[in-house]
Image (cartoon, rainbow, N blue to C red):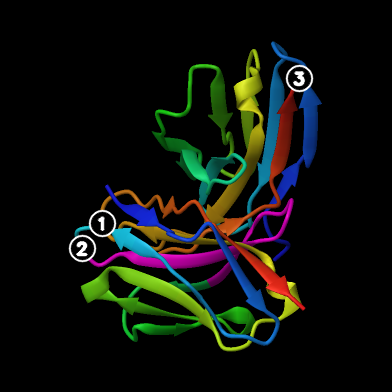
Amino acid sequence: AQSVTQPDIHITVSEGASLELRCNYSYGATPYLFWYVQSPGQGLQLLLKYFSGDTLVQGIKGFEAEFKRSQSSFNLRKPSVHWSDAAEYFCAVGASGGSYIPTFGRGTSLIVHP
Amino acid sequence: DTGVSQDPRHKITKRGQNVTFRCDPISEHNRLYWYRQTLGQGPEFLTYFQNEAQLEKSRLLSDRFSAERPKGSFSTLEIQRTEQGDSAMYLCASSLSRGGGETQYFGPGTRLLVL
């Protein structure tokens, strides 16, 4: 079975600074990988996804993520953070074979200082 | 495309009562998922449907939980004899299965508080 680790529970950055949120996964084959964002009291919004092909994936709101097979990582990045980016971020991994049910990490809470 | 909707958004109930939540997926999506999310955690899979068939259930889904998707469109999740430990956000997601990678789209969730 697949698993996801988001090692940082909280990340604090200043507005305008760059951001990197870490995600490590465990899965025997090439996984499907996702990043979602959740604002307080809301559902999850998809930021970006990786299924195959180019390992650098562009998403919405200026986010990107890079799939690194050798490191089993799919870190999320943004060059300049805005105050509105403050939210909870979830990485998820889905199996590329068998029943498709993604497993989510516990999330990283992003705090943005003005 | 109106997105995934869930009703109600909030529910407060007393322990031992039954509750039912509804999810309306994106209209052309054939798969529908239910998740539970507790504070400080990511969503945990409960069950999913492909059309009207319930294909998989998590061990988290006790006998007090039942889900239906009678016509392959909307779905309901019922919790019988609620317990305080059932307090959580219940999320619904839908996707279009095309035999390859698929993307889940989430609703806003139903927040349940059991007193």
Please give left or right for residue A60 compared with residue B3 in the image.
left
- Horizontal side, residue B15 vs residue A4: left or right: right
Q: Is residue B89 above or below residue B31?
A: above
Label 1 – label 2 distance at C-alpha: 8 Å
Q: Amino acid at mark 1?
A: Gly
| Rendering quarter of residue A19 | bottom right
Which residue position is annotated with label 2? A29
Q: What residue span does the magenta drawing correspond to?
A: A29-47
Q: Considering depth in this image, is B77 or A46 the residue closer to the camera?
A: A46
Residue type highlighted by circle 2: Ala
Q: Secondary structure at mark 3?
A: loop
Q: Is residue B69 left or right of residue B16?
A: left
**Which amino acid lies under the numbered mark 3 shown in the image of this protein?**
Leu
What residue is disc 1 on? A97
Q: Nearer the viewer, mark 1 or mark 2?
A: 2
Chain to which mark 2 belongs: A
> Residue B115 got which mark?
3
Up/down of B39 relative to B79, above or below: below
Q: Quadrant of the C terminus of chain B?
A: top right
On the image, the x and y values in percent for residue B13 come to 78, 21
Q: Residues within 10 Å of mark 2 (few under 14, many from 20)?
A: few
